[in-house]
Image: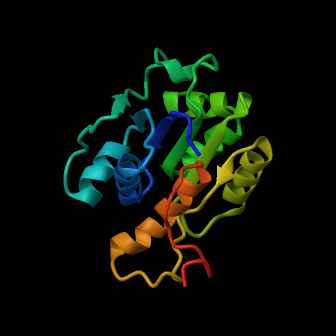
């Protein structure tokens, strides 16, 4: 079955867990039917955290194109664009709160608002623990609005041996939720 060419927005926020975003970008580029475009947007502190946690600065790799978080002069700031998926990975509780409460004060929040209003796929990957009641209520609001909340909670049933193996259990779940074909381990299907 031929998949249509997809256009994805990947937002990286200042939550710890840059390895999730890095591995997701790598995985998207290696798919059998990769996205036609990947728009990458970093929050103000996300690049600093990326460099600290990954040990090197972010380098743009095609088909990824970076956009500034303080500009609304980009296609996906409007519902007239044809970007069909937005993934916020990792998603800070601050960005979840702003999106849940309709505060579009930067490009990440505005693009997420566009995805919700246009009934397109918005996948949020919070990397926080524990959750407080405000976090839980914001995630409930976002779920009710149509977003998918996929916490960065690794699975162990494929017996991961490295940190990358563990991280990639979350990445493969995101890939699947985004609707891409993936030959990932599936519980009781690969034995």
Q: Position of residue 2 (x, y in %)?
A: 56, 41
Drawn side of residue 68 relative to residue 5, left or right:
left
Drawn side of residue 56 relative to residue 17, left or right:
left
Question: Residue furthest toward the front?
Answer: 1
Q: Nearer the viewer, residue 130 or 71?
A: 71
Question: Residue furthest toward the left?
Answer: 56
Q: Position of residue 82 (x, y in %)?
A: 58, 23
How many discs appear? 0
Q: Residue at x 61, y 59 (%)?
A: 150
**Which image quarter is the C terminus in?**
bottom right
Q: Is residue 183 above or below residue 179?
A: below
Q: Is residue 3 above or below residue 159?
A: above
Drawn side of residue 91 relative to residue 114, left or right:
left
Q: Nearer the viewer, residue 93 or 184?
A: 184
The colour scheme applied to this rendered structure is rainbow
Q: Position of residue 140 (x, y in %)?
A: 76, 53
Q: Nearer the viewer, residue 2 or 176?
A: 2
Q: Residue at x 58, y 73 (%)?
A: 186
Q: Position of residue 7 (x, y in %)?
A: 50, 32
Q: Residue at x 42, y 68 (%)?
A: 167
Q: Nearer the viewer, residue 136 or 113?
A: 113
Image quadrant where residue 162 sits = bottom left
């Amino acid at each position: 079955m031929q998949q249509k060419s997809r256009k994805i927005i990947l937002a990286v926020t200042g939550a710890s867990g840059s390895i999730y975003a890095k591995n997701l970008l790598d995985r998207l580029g290696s798919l059998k039917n990769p996205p036609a475009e990947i728009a990458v947007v970093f929050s103000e502190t996300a690049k600093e955290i990326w460099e600290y946690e990954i040990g090197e600065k972010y380098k743009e790799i095609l088909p990824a194109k970076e956009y500034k978080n303080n500009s609304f002069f980009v296609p996906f700031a409007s519902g007239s664009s044809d970007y069909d998926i937005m993934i916020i990975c990792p998603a800070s509780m601050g960005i979840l709160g702003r999106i849940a409460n309709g505060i579009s004060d930067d490009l990440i929040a505005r693009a997420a608002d566009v995805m919700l209003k246009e009934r397109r796929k918005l996948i949020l990957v919070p990397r926080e623990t524990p959750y407080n009641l405000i976090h839980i209520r914001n995630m409930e609001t976002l779920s009710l609005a149509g977003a998918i909340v996929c916490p960065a909670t690794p699975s162990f049933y494929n017996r991961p041996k490295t940190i990358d193996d563990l991280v990639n259990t979350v990445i493969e779940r995101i890939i699947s939720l985004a609707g891409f074909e993936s030959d990932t381990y599936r519980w009781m299907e690969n034995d």
